[in-house]
Amino acid sequence: MQAVSNLEVAMNSIPGDATFDEELRATIVEVWTRLMKSAPPAAFTFSEKLRYTVPQASALLGQSRAKTYCDLRDGQLRAIKDGQRTYIPGSEIARRSRLADGI
């Protein structure tokens, strides 16, 4: 896996007397791998016609999920409910981005 090899390179390039026993190395690799799997994709398509989950919208807006939920609660973002799921229309994300840019 490319992410693990990047981690190995980074761990081996730490200056000084940093040595890692095998148990610590395995733990670091496990955590790193879990983080890389949970990270959002580097690029995904944005469209005003699509709807986005709260974590996706948060990433697009450059803010935390908690801030996004606060914005939903305060009426600053419009949401679409589908059962228990909450989605944010792409048009709302675009509107919010234009407001932030002062356009």
Image (cartoon, rainbow, N blue to C red):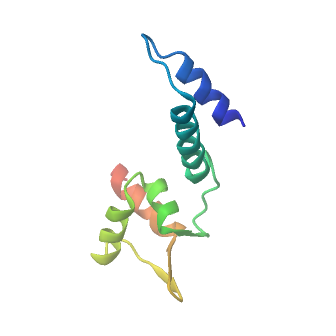
Look at 36% across and 49% down and name the residue there: 101
Look at 61% across and 50% down and name the residue there: 37
- Residue 32, horizontal then vertical, whole percent: 55, 41
Total count of labels: 0
- Residue 53, horizontal then vertical, whole percent: 53, 69
Report the side of 83 relative to 44 (left or right): left
| Residue 59 sits above or below residue 54 on the image | above
Quadrant location of the N terminus in the rendered image: top right
- Nearest to the observer: residue 57 or residue 15: 15
- Residue 51, horizontal then vertical, whole percent: 57, 71
| Residue 29 sits above or below residue 14 on the image | below
Report the side of 67 relative to 45 (left or right): left
- Nearest to the observer: residue 86 or residue 18: 18
Q: Residue 4 falls in which quadrant of the image?
A: top right
| Residue 46 sits above or below residue 20 on the image | below
Look at 44% across and 11% down and name the residue there: 15
| Residue 18 sits above or below residue 38 on the image | above
Residue at the left extreme of this rendering: 74
Residue at the right extreme of this rendering: 1
Report the side of 86 relative to 76 (left or right): right
Residue at the bottom extreme of this rendering: 83
- Residue 11, horizontal then vertical, whole percent: 53, 23
- Nearest to the observer: residue 21 or residue 3: 21
